[in-house]
Image (cartoon, helix red, strand yellow):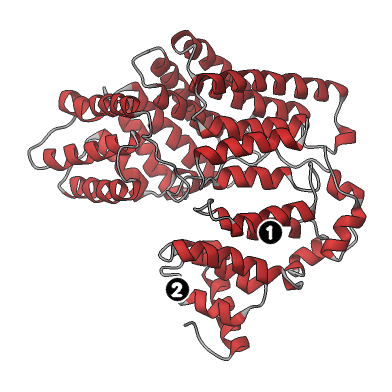
Amino acid sequence: MGMVSSISLGVLLGVAVSQNAISAADDEPPAPTPDDGLDRPNPTAGKSSAVEYCFEWNVATLAGDYEKVGRRNPSWDKKVLETLSLFAQSRSRKGDAQQLSAGFEKAVKEAIAAGCDDPLINYLHARFAAGVAARASKEGAQVHVHAAEGLERSKYAEVRKFYGCLRAAEALRSASKSQTNTPPEVHQFRRSALNHLVAVLNDKRTPIEEVHDACRELMGEVERNKKQLEEFYFAIEKPLFANWPQEALALLIKGNFYIKHAWKARGKDYADKVTEEGWKLFFERLTEAEKALEKAWSLDPTIEQIALSMMTVELGQGKGRERMEMWFDRAMRLNSNSFSACSHKLYYLEPKWHGSPEAMLKFGRECVNSAEWGGRVPMILAEAHYSLASYLPAKERKEKEYWKRPGVWKDVKASFDKFFEKYPDALGYRHNYARYAYWCEQWDDLNKQLGLMGPVNYDYFGGKMEFEKMVKLAKERSGGSPK
C-alpha cells in the first residue's frame, strides 16, 4: 500500500497525523457513482444492433406479456401500453433518458388513476408511490413488498419477478435501519430474486446487457454479506458461462465479483493486522479478477466499466502508477465525462494508497482546468478536499477546521463555478455548493446558492431544522438574505 510521510501530510493540512491514520485500510474501494445523465457517453455508438435487440426483448416481456397475461381493460389499456413502451426504451437505453423518465412517470400515474390494478403496472408505479427502494421508509417498503407479491402470483416474465423481489429486499433492508441484523424477510426476497435470476440466465435469448445489469444489482444487494456474496455468485456462474462464455459483460461480472471477494478475504484491518492467509487469498482473487477483466477488454475494448474495474485491481495489486494511468486514460477516451474514472484515480492517489495530498490536489486542479473533460469532472477538486478533511483528528473534523484553511474555498469555488458554466440548470448540485459554502463560512456565496437551489432536499442537510439553522446563520453573518 502506498503512503506519504506524516510530515508531508502534516505540512499540507497543518496538523500532526499519526502513521496509523494513513496506513489503515478503508472499506473496499468505492463503486462507480450513480448515472445521472451528466457523465454518460453515447450508449448506442457502434452498438445499434444490440440496442435494437434489447429493445425488442423488453417489448416482448413487457407489452407482449401484458397482452397475454395482464389485467386488461379498455379504460386503461392505452396508458398501460404507453407506459410499457417508454419503460422498454429506457431499459434499452434508447433515446433521451430524462425525457423517457418524465414521460414514463406521467404515463404510469395516469394508468393507475384510470383504475389499473395490473401487477406489472403496480410494480412500476411503486417507485413513485414508495420512492427509491434503497432509501425506503417502513411504509414505502410495504408498497414494494406488495408489488413483489403481486408479480410472484402473476404469469409475468422471470426477469420482472426478479426485479420485484430485489426491490422488496432493498426496501425492507432500508426500512430496518440496521447495519448488522438483516431481517429474515430480506433474506427471503433475496433468495427469491436469486431463483428468478437463475431462470433468466437459463434462457440464452436474454440480452447480455440485461444479464449484466441483473447480476450486478443482485451482487450489489448482497455484497455486505460475505457468505451470500460467494453463494449467490457461484449459483449464477454456471448458467452465465454456459450461455455467454465469450461475452465481455459476462467476464466483467466475474471480474467484479473477484474484486469484492478479494477485499472480503483481506478484511478491514490495518495492513500489519491482516493474516497471512488473508493476504494470500486477497492476491489470488485479484489475479482471478485481472484475468477475467483482461480477457473482457480483449473481447470488447469499448466498455468503460472494464477499465474502471482494472483501476481497482491495480489499487490492490500496486504494480505501479503507470498501470493505473493507462486504464484511466482508456476510460476517459471512452467517456470524457467519466466522473467515475476520475473518482477512482483520486482514490488511488490518497495518501493511504499510492499517492499524496499534493498529488490529489494537483489532479483535482487538472479536472477543473481541462478543456476536454466535462460532466461532473470539475467537482473532483472539491472531492479531493473532502477526502483530505477526513484525515483530520475527530475533533477538528467535527468543528470543520479544514474548511477554514487558506486556499480551500478558492478550489471549491473553482470546482462548482466550472461545472455550473455548462450546467446552470442542474439545481440539485446547488445543494452541494451550498453545503461547502457553509463549511467554509462563505456567507454571501451561501446566500446566493440558497436562492438558486430550487426545491430543497432537507435530508441532505440533516433535516429541515438543520437547514433552517444554516439559512438563519447565513443571513445573520452576511447581513442579507438568500439572493
Q: Is residue 169 left or right of residue 71?
A: right
**10 Å crowding of disc 2: few (<14), some (14-19), many (20+):** some
Along the viewing direction, whichever of 199 and 172 lies nearer the viewer: 199
In this figure, which residue is indicated by the disc labeled 1?
A: 386
Give the amino acid type for the residue marked by disc 1 in the picture. Tyr
**10 Å crowding of disc 1: few (<14), some (14-19), many (20+):** some
Q: Position of residue 346 (x, y in %)?
A: 68, 48
Dividing the picture into quadrants, the one containing residue 243 is top left
Q: Is residue 33 left or right of residue 114?
A: right
Dividing the picture into quadrants, the one containing residue 272 is top right
Q: Position of residue 397 (x, y in %)?
A: 76, 63
User: Of helix, strand and loop, which one carries label 1?
Assistant: helix
Q: Is residue 397 left or right of residue 200?
A: right
Give the amino acid type for the residue marked by disc 2 in the picture. Leu
Q: Looking at the picture, does residue 365 appear above or below residue 246?
A: below
In this figure, which residue is indicated by the disc labeled 2?
A: 452
User: Of helix, strand and loop, which one carries label 2?
Assistant: loop
Q: Looking at the picture, does residue 415 appear above or below residue 187?
A: below
* Residue beneath the point at 70% across and 45% down: 347
Q: Is residue 200 left or right of residue 169?
A: left
Sooner in the amino-acid sequence: mark 2 or mark 1: 1
* Residue beneath the point at 39% across and 36% down: 43
Q: Position of residue 28 (x, y in %)?
A: 69, 37
Along the viewing direction, whichever of 24 and 115 lies nearer the viewer: 24
Q: Position of residue 61 (x, y in %)?
A: 26, 25
* Residue beneath the point at 49% across and 53% down: 375
CA–CA distance between discs 2 and 1? 23 Å
* Residue beneath the point at 49% across and 44% down: 134
Q: Is residue 457 visible?
A: no
Q: Quadrant of the N terminus?
A: top right
